[in-house]
Amino acid sequence: MKPFDKISSYFKAYAQSLADELVDSIVQEFDFEVPKEEIQNAKKTYESFMKFIGESIVSETEKMPDGLLDWSKENGERQAKNGGRISDIVMRYPDSRQVFIDKVTSIGKEFDLGMDEVVLLIKKVNLILDISINETVFAFERFSELLLEKAQDEVNELTAPVVPIQDGIAVLPLIGSIDYDRAKLIMEKVVPEIKKLQIECLIMDFSGIVNIDAQIAKYVFDIRSVLRLVGVNTIASGVRPDLAQQAVTEGIDLTSVPTFANVKQAIESLEEE
């Protein structure tokens, strides 16, 4: 049996005791107290990690076991899901790496490895640790982005409500800024809701819009065109002087849309018809 084969078998056979020893050593290096529950969870995690190392050090390629990659991804996703910081994981790697190297060097001596073989073994362990932390960070970022997108979708839905105010009349308060995603949401969610409520006239209120540009105007006109196709009249309110000035500067023609200073004036104009 080759030296690395023996060490591989050793890591897999004594994974639990190695994990306990390493975690205890790593915790001693920290200048903060680690909860007992976290220590126990770490020992279980490191036990799996020891087995992954045992598989990896005899691999002739740099391809890591799927189990190691999955384990690393789960670490990152769990941290993101719990609202933690990726730095809390990364900051522990230097101490963990040093303890790993010391232990691997000691094991290498026990198995009478030569200096070159010990160096090669340490390189393999370093590669495993590097790939593991990379996968953890990538998974954290991906999952964080998914959570952010989900939260943004929820916010978008809350910031584009259709508010019925009279029979056949409703207000759509526009808040913040309008981009492609919000315009798409209005198309997909608001337009069907307007049909369901049997709205004949929709007042699009710009009071909460921070600024207006050609792109926003395009989105608004697209929404207005779709509503017109389903028989809904659209008027605008809350176009402040600064927004009107921006519209002129951007070369936006708002003359085709009946425009009023506020919702009250818009409603009064409808009552006069």
Image (cartoon, rainbow, N blue to C red):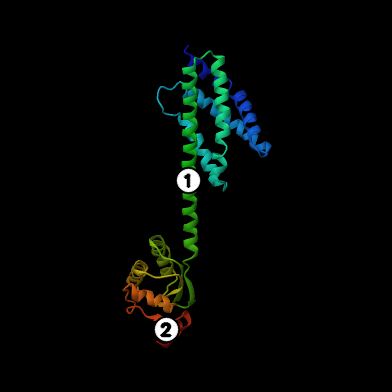
- On the image, the x and y values in percent for residue 202 come to 42, 75
Q: Nearer the viewer, mark 1 or mark 2?
A: 1
- Could you tell me which residue is drawn at 51 percent across and 34 percent down? 71
Residue located farthest toward the front when viewing the structure as drawn: 115
Tell me the kind of residue under disc 2: Leu
Mark nearer the N terminus (1 vs 2): 1
Quadrant of residue 111 within the rendered picture: top right
Please say if 191 is above or below 126. below
- On the image, the x and y values in percent for residue 152 come to 48, 57
Quadrant of residue 90 within the rendered picture: top right
Q: Which residue is mark 1?
A: 141
- Could you tell me which residue is drawn at 47 percent across and 79 percent down? 263
- On the image, the x and y values in percent for residue 267 come to 45, 82
Please say if 211 is above or below 136. below
Tell me the kind of residue under disc 1: Glu
Q: Which residue is mark 2?
A: 270
> Which part of the image, by quadrant, shows the C terminus?
bottom left
- Residue 239: tell me if it is visible: no
Tally of numbered discs: 2
Please say if 264 is above or below 204. below
Please say if 24 is above or below 190. above
- On the image, the x and y values in percent for residue 86 come to 53, 44
- Residue 164: tell me if it is visible: yes
Closer to the camera in the image, 120 or 246 = 120
Callout 1 secondary element: helix
Residue located farthest toward the top when viewing the structure as drawn: 1
